[in-house]
Amino acid sequence: MTVPSQHYANLSEDTYKNHAVGRRAPGHEELVPVGNETYAILEHVDNKATGYQGTIYRRESTGEIVVAHRGTEGKIDDILTDASMVRSRHNPQADDALALTKHALDYAKDYGNRTGHQPEVTMTGHSLGGALAQISAHHYDLKGETFNSYGAASLSYRIPEGGNTMVNHVMASDPVSAASPHFGQVRIYAKPDEISTLGHAGYSNSRANFLIPDSPVLAAGTSLGAHKLDNFLKEGSVLSDPSARTLAETNKRMINEYRTDLDQIRAGITVISRSGRGLGQDAIDAIRGPLAPGEPAKRDAREHGNDHTSLRIDQPGHVGNTLFQDAQRGVHAQDARAGRTPDQQSAQLSGSLASEMHAVGGQRIDAVMMSPDAARTFAVQGRVDDPAQLRVSVETVAAMNTPLEQSSQRVADNAARQSVALEQQQTQTQQQQQGARALG
C-alpha cells in the first residue's frame, strides 16, 4: 500500500462532492488533483433508497485504485444508519459498499489483463464511510485507511478487532471513533483543546484517576468538532504534525479511559436495544468467533458458485450486475423524460438490455435510447456518435415483460460458456508452448 495517508484523507473529502452517477467511459474520467498527483474518477454511486454514496478513484501515476465511501452528512438516511449500527449491530449500506468494492476489484482485474500488472485496491472513508471501508476491507481482505471511523468490530459481520490490515486515524476526543472497536490499528492524534476538554470532564493521567468522577457524555457533547474531517485536511492536518501524536501519547491514560467509557456506553445501549432473538444471535456469533479477513468473500463464492446462478442480475455479486446497473440508470433516465415512475417493468427492461450487451461481449452501457415510436430500446457502449460503438437493441414491450430470472440465467449461462472457452484456449496455448519447447 503506497498511497499516502494525506491522499486518503483528501479522497475521503472529495467523495462528499456530488459527482455524476455512473461509470466513466475510458478517456472521459474527471481528474481530481491531490497534492502533486492526480486521481481519475472511474465510477460514482448514489443509492437514494439506502443513502449510500461512494466513489472509485485511480491513481494516475501508479494505477492503484482507491474506493472512498462517503460518511455521515446529517441527512436522515445517515442518521438512521448510524443509529442502526448501535442498536442492531447492522449497517444498511454495507451491501452497496461491498458491491462498489467488487466493481473496483473488477476494474483492477481488467487493468491487469490489459497491462500485465494488476493494481492494488484499497479502502478509505470518514465516519460512517470509515465503517463501510472496514467492512469492505475485511470482506475482501484489502487494506486501507480511515478517519474518525465508527469501528466495525462491534457489528454483526464477525469482524475481528485489531490487526494491521487497516490504519484508523482518530482524534483523541472524537466520540464516534471511540464508541466501537476497530478492525485494524488505531492511531490517535490530540490537540491541546481536546486534552483541556477531557480534563474539564474529570479525566486525568493520574494513576489514581479512578477516584476522580468523570463525565464521558459531557466530554463527548463538547467534542463534536473533533469528529470533523477538517482535522486531517490542508495546512492544519494532524497527519503532518508530529506533535499531535506526541501529545496523544503523553496523555494516553486519560484518552484511553475516555474512549473505554464511551465504548461501554455504546455496548450497553446495544444490549438494551437488542431483541431476545438478536441477543441469541450475538451469543452464537461470540461462540463461533470472528472470520478471517477475506473469508466472507470466499464463503460467498462457495455458496453461490462462480457462475452466480443463485443470484439475480439486480443483486450485487451476480456476474451481470454491473451491466444491469448501467442499463438501469439509462432506463430510469428514459422514464424521467416520459414522466413515468420506474417500476418492475423498468427493471426487467434493464435486465434484458444487460443480457443482450453481455451476449455480444460488452463491458459497460454508456447510453440507453429508444426509437421514435418507442418500439425498440437500444443500449450503447461508447459514444453515441462514434462509428465504432457497440450497440444492442430489444423489443421494448417484450423486454419489459421478460422476468429478471430469465435475463439472469441467460447471462450466467453465457458467462459459464465464456469461462470454459477461455480455459480451453489457455490449455491449448500451454500445450503448444510445451510442444515448442520440446522440439527446441
Image (cartoon, rainbow, N blue to C red):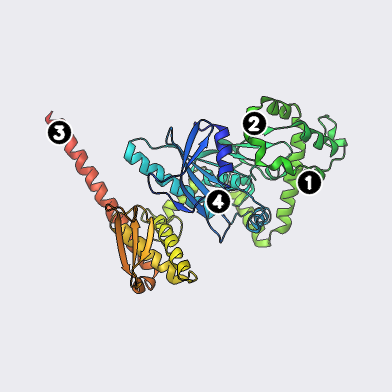
Identify the secondary structure beneath mark 1: helix
Q: Nearer the viewer, residue 423 or 7?
A: 7
In which quarter of the view is residue 322 placed? bottom left
Identify the secondary structure beneath mark 3: helix
Residue 44: percent from the left, percent from the top?
Answer: 49, 50
- Give the mark, 3 or 2, whose residue is nearer the N terminus: 2
User: Which three-letter amino acid code belongs to the residue tagged 3?
Assistant: Ala
- Give the mark, 3 or 4, whose residue is nearer the N terminus: 4
Residue 77: percent from the left, percent from the top?
Answer: 63, 58
What is the distance, in whole Å, between disc 2 and disc 1 at their CAs?
A: 26 Å
Vertically, is 256 above or below 398? Answer: above
The image's mark for residue 436 is: 3
What is the distance, in whole Å, between disc 4 and disc 1 at their CAs?
A: 30 Å
Q: Which residue is mark 2?
A: 235
- Give the mark, 4 or 1, whose residue is nearer the N terminus: 4
Which residue reaches farthest left? Answer: 439
- Give the mark, 1 or 3, whose residue is nearer the N terminus: 1
The image's mark for residue 18 is: 4
Answer with left or right where residue 340 lies relative to residue 372. right
What is the distance, in whole Å, between disc 4 and disc 2 at their CAs?
A: 24 Å
Q: Quadrant of the C terminus?
A: top left
Residue 314: percent from the left, percent from the top?
Answer: 44, 61
User: Which three-letter amino acid code belongs to the residue tagged 4?
Assistant: Asn
The image's mark for residue 302 is: none
Q: Which residue is mark 1?
A: 221
Pointer 2 local density, CA inside 10 Å: few below 14, some 14–19, many at least 20: few
User: Which residue is pictured at 56% across the width and 54% down the height?
Assistant: 52
Answer with left or right where residue 370 lies relative to residue 42. left
What is the distance, in whole Å, between disc 1 and disc 3 at their CAs?
A: 74 Å
Residue 314 appears in the rendering:
no
